[in-house]
Image (cartoon, rainbow, N blue to C red):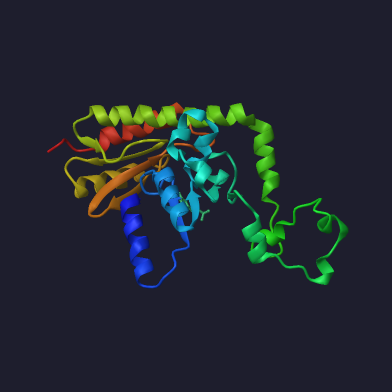
């Protein structure tokens, strides 16, 4: 996101009598793990009184390691934040963690207190009634499986997992960058490698199909605008270096020459 474009969009809304209320920065977009400038967007949000949410669905897991936190500089200006432990933090689908700087706006908007839900514990403020933080009354007990992950791996274990994934993705990126048949199409801040064949869309798509025809690796073909590319996401619980090496072997064997 360009903060200048955001500012212009807000100004245009105000001119047409609309009230901008929320802006969402993405730290690690799904397509290429692009990172929005959280601080700059946060400053615009503050200036206009907008709620600023950060979507770090995938990359949020990396923030357990201090060396990745620069990517979300400005977090203290943010109102809410989500990340999905089910993506890269060793937790089974589905599990999305939601943080708010201040829970009161949620409770003001969503809290209900019919007589049959009144009780002493709630009244005294001793417990948090999460039913007042979202639309439904009922909720699944997803925290339990997350608790097991945290207890099993610990913070250090999860950091090791993240760094291991990033290292393996880096090793693949090295092969790709050194080979004149390929180009990396986006920066690699985390463990997603986006690349294409220099011959363009046709060889890139053919290569993606060839990779996925092997029955032990799977990549997602994607595109930005008209440019086809291949996404390799490294981070599954049991992924090891030998799997990434095997993927490179398949890529190397199936890609046609540069021209
Ligand atoms: C995966 C992903 C989502 C989807 O998250 P859900 O919690 O499953 O809706 C949203 N945003 C980004 C950036 C993602 O990578």
x and y percentages locating residue 155 in the rendered image: 61, 30
Left or right: 46 with respect to 214? right
Q: Residue lying furthest right in this view?
A: 120
State the residue in front, 137 or 112.
112
| Residue farthest to the bottom, as pictured | 17
Q: Quick check: 246 left or right of 180?
A: right
Of the pair 37 and 141, the residue shown nearer to us: 37
- The quadrant in which residue 5 appears is bottom left
The C terminus lies in quadrant: top left
Please determine whether, in this image, residue 128 is positioned above or below residue 154.
below
Task: Report the residue at 64% width, 30% height from top.
Answer: 154
Circle count: 0
In front of the other: 78 or 25: 78
Q: Position of residue 174 (x, y in %)?
A: 31, 27
91, above or below 49, in the image: above
- 105 on left or right of 39: right
Q: Is residue 135 visible?
A: no
> In percent of the image, x 39 and y 43: which residue is there?
35
Indicate the quadrant where residue 192 lies: top left
Q: Is residue 90 visible?
A: yes
Residue at image x 83%, y 59%?
123
**Image coordinates for residue 126, horizontal then vertical, percent:** 81, 50
Residue found at x 83% / y 71%: 115
Q: Position of residue 179 (x, y in %)?
A: 22, 29
């Amino acid at each position: 996101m360009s903060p200048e474009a955001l500012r212009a969009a807000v100004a245009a809304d105000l001119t047409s009598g609309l009230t901008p209320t929320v802006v969402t920065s993405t730290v690690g977009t799904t397509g290429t793990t692009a990172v929005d400038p959280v601080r700059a967007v946060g400053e615009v949000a503050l200036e206009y009184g907008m709620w600023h949410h950060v979507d770090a669905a995938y990359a949020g897991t990396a923030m357990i390691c201090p060396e990745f936190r620069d990517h979300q500089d400005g977090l203290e200006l943010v109102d809410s934040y989500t990340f999905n432990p089910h993506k890269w933090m060793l937790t089974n689908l589905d599990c999305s963690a939601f943080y708010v700087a201040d829970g009161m706006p949620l409770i003001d908007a969503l809290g209900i207190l019919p007589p049959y839900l009144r009780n002493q514990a709630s009244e005294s403020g001793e417990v948090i009634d999460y039913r007042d933080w979202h639309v439904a009354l009922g909720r699944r007990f997803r925290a339990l499986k997350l608790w097991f992950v945290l207890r099993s791996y610990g913070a250090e274990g999860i950091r090791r997992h993240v760094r291991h994934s990033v290292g393996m993705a880096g090793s693949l990126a090295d092969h790709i960058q050194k080979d004149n048949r390929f180009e990396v199409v986006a920066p690699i801040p985390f463990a997603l490698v986006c690349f294409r064949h220099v011959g363009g869309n046709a060889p890139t798509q053919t290569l993606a199909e060839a990779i996925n025809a092997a029955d032990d690796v799977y990549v997602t073909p994607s595109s930005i605008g008209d440019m086809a590319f291949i996404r390799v996401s490294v981070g599954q619980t049991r992924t090891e270096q030998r799997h990434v090496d095997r993927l490179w072997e398949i890529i190397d064997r199936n890609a046609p020459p540069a021209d």
